[in-house]
Amino acid sequence: MGARDARDTVTVLRGEQELYQRVGHLLAAATDFACAANDLATWVADQRMDEFTAAMARRAGDMRVRKIYRAGLLLDVISARELAEHRDRFGARIRITTDELNETIVIDGRVAILAGDRSSGVRSYSVISQPDTVHAVLALFETAWRSATELAVYDARVAEIRALAPAVLDLLSQGTKDEAAARALGLGVRTYRRRVAELMSALGAESRFQAGVRARELGLV
């Protein structure tokens, strides 16, 4: 069971199984669903999410679904395809950001779920029902939503570098000098450097080192 605070407005749950056991009924009945995630695995590691996904498919015209994802996901062909399929299948609006995200779900403006980290092996989730706190979380989501870019627009922006991304990231991780990396890819040095800059932008990275870290977090290298 989750541990509750004194006012019973925050419940800390351990692992995806407990999360969906406790809030699955809210997800299935949602009419407004807002989600922010760094990757595609944060909220879908348990089979109960399949039940919610099926409910979404049945009620696609009756609910508003908005999702924000980190831009680096689009560098992976499979992830980019999954995002597009989700948008087309469920009528979800999906936007992309290069900013840091607090992984969050807000259900009907009444319940917020904040994902913890995996440092202890099992991810924890804080389920919040205190109205002022939920409204504050939703306000942060709305701010991120307004500054993010529609999936189709951002996908077109990174499509040109997607095929090269794994090779460029591999060369960066090896510390290969630009001239040698450009030759290996059959590119001019200026073109290679432009591709690196575009890749860093897609990953929301300010340095090549940070780009490598974020690429590893996303499983791109």
Image (cartoon, helix red, strand yellow):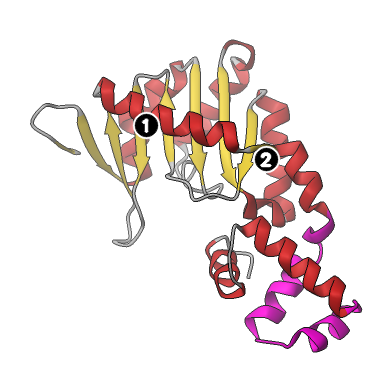
- How crowded is the residue under tag 2: few (<14 C-alpha within 10 Å), some, or many (20+)? many
In terms of secondary structure, what is the magenta stretch mainly? Answer: helix
Quarter of the N terminus within the rendering: top left
Q: Quadrant of residue 9?
A: top left
Q: Is residue 39 above or below residue 183?
A: above
Between residues 29 and 161, which one lies in front from this camera angle? Answer: 161
List the residue tagged with mark 2: 83
162 drawn magenta: yes
Q: Position of residue 129 (x, y in %)?
A: 26, 24
Secondary structure under badge 1? helix
List the residue tagged with mark 1: 137
Q: Is 56 on the left-hand or right-hand side of 88?
A: left
Q: Position of residue 48 (x, y in %)?
A: 45, 34
Looking at the rendering, the stretch of residues picked out in magenta corresponds to 160-188
Task: Please identify the residue farthest to the left as the structure is shown.
Answer: 6
Q: Nearer the viewer, mark 1 or mark 2?
A: 1
Q: Is residue 166 above or below residue 20?
A: below
Secondary structure under badge 2? helix
* Callout 1 amino acid: Val
Q: Say if mark 1 contacts mark 2, CB within 8 Å.
A: no
Q: Position of residue 195 (x, y in %)?
A: 79, 67
Is residue 132 visible in the rendered structure shown here? Answer: yes
- At a point 37% along the width and 33% down the height, the residue shown is 20
Is residue 1 visible in the rendered structure shown here? Answer: no
- At a point 85% along the width and 79% down the height, the residue shown is 189
Q: Is 124 on the left-hand or right-hand side of 94?
A: left
175 drawn magenta: yes
**Which dot marks residue 44?**
none
- At a point 20% along the width and 39% down the height, the residue shown is 2
Task: Please identify the residue farthest to the top as the structure is shown.
Answer: 62
Q: Is residue 197 above or below residue 87?
A: below
Q: Quadrant of residue 103?
A: top left
